[in-house]
Image (cartoon, helix red, strand yellow):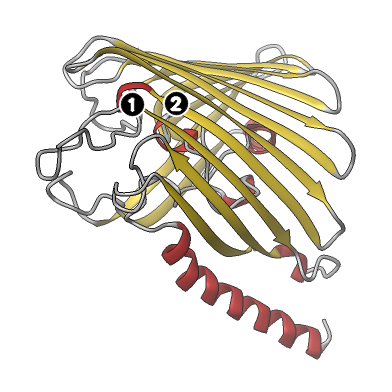
Amino acid sequence: MKSWKARLLVAFMLVAMLLATVAGPALANDGDRGDGFNGRGDRNDNRQDRNDNNRSHNDGFFFVNSFNNDFFDDDDFFDGPENQFDIPQIYIDVNVPVGTGLRVRGGKFLFFKQIDPNASVFYSHSFTFGGALPFTLTGITGYYELAENLSLEAGVVRGWDDALEDDNDKESFVGRVRYRASDELNLSLAAITGPELEDNQDYRTVVNFVASYRVSDNLTFLLDSIYGYQAGTPGEGATDYYGAAVYGIYKLNDYVSAAARLEYYRDDEGATTGILGAGASPPDGIGFSSQSLYEATVGLTVTPFANDEIGRNFKVRPEVRYDYSSEDYFDGFTEDNQLTFAVDAIFNF
């Protein structure tokens, strides 16, 4: 690589990392915003899961560790350390020689969501990414390809984001069917069901449908939709939540691609967003109130050195996002809307 190009690449990386470190958390992951899960990774089932399954047909051990700052750092809300190590994935894959090959996975793993920032075209994330689905599961699953374009994965897990302990000592069941209808159209239907509330045997069931359609080599559309039902919510009875996000991604050239996202999310009785109810305030706890959430996001993915062997691993993602809620959900639960500017930088190695 020529010396001037190396210096330019280093300069770009330093500036982008500075922006991502200083501007990113300040603008797009503000601790006062109601959308408290936006600092975590989005999911793209059709890309990340394919990579998972291609890798999984070999026996192996997989481990990921991270050190995190807890969003809820107020002891009046939740107990526990503000800064702590977290192991989102630690599992073993075993390939059983049955038919086309049965992959058995046991341990703690991601199923619905991906924390790899490359699995999303945006720095921020959809509302459904927050509390509508579990981040991690601990248990055992089996993956089997029924046909070249059809696969099934199912298993038994401890519950939502539970590892060594379970709130009610009851198992949950998870499953997913993927179907590649054509080279352009991919479909995925996943679900999880089981009792999740503490000392409560009422079931929570969530269904997630994802579809992607490649219109051309440059244009792709993605639909991510969800429906959840929780029986026996304390003080409220049964409740449900549902929503959908539509993505459009267009590759302008080798250096720049543009993306847009529109989303609607309805949370009856505040079962997943848990906004403060009328007159409630800390340390009384988080109240429950129904709300409808809307968001629109547009952004770019810029790869300034797309044709360079090393430089193509570096990209910058600026974005603009507008959120609206039927309740005061943002800016410390004082505003019903917000406008956010954000940027991050990624270097893959």
Residue 101 visible, this angle:
yes
**Picture quarter with the C terminus:** bottom right
> CB of mark 1 within 8 Å of CB of mark 2?
yes
Q: Residues within 10 Å of mark 2 (few under 14, many from 20)?
A: many
Alpha carbons under labels 1 and 2: distance apart: 8 Å
- Say what amino acid the circle numbered 1 marks: Ser
> In this figure, which residue is indicated by the disc labeled 1?
290
Residue 50 lies left or right of residue 169; in this view the side is right
- Say what amino acid the circle numbered 2 marks: Arg
Task: Give whichever of 112, 256 is nearer the camera.
Answer: 256
Question: In the image, residue 166 lies at what x, y percent?
Answer: 24, 25
User: Is 254 rendered above or below residue 52?
Assistant: below
Circle number at residue 266? 2
In terms of sequence position, does the residue under pointer 1 or pointer 2 come before the other? 2
Who's the residue at 33% across and 15% down the image? 239
Who's the residue at 46% across and 36% down the image? 91
Question: In the image, residue 230 lies at what x, y percent?
Answer: 33, 15
Who's the residue at 18% across and 18% down the image? 234
Residue 20 lies left or right of residue 254; in this view the side is left
Question: In the image, residue 140 lies at what x, y percent?
Answer: 44, 22
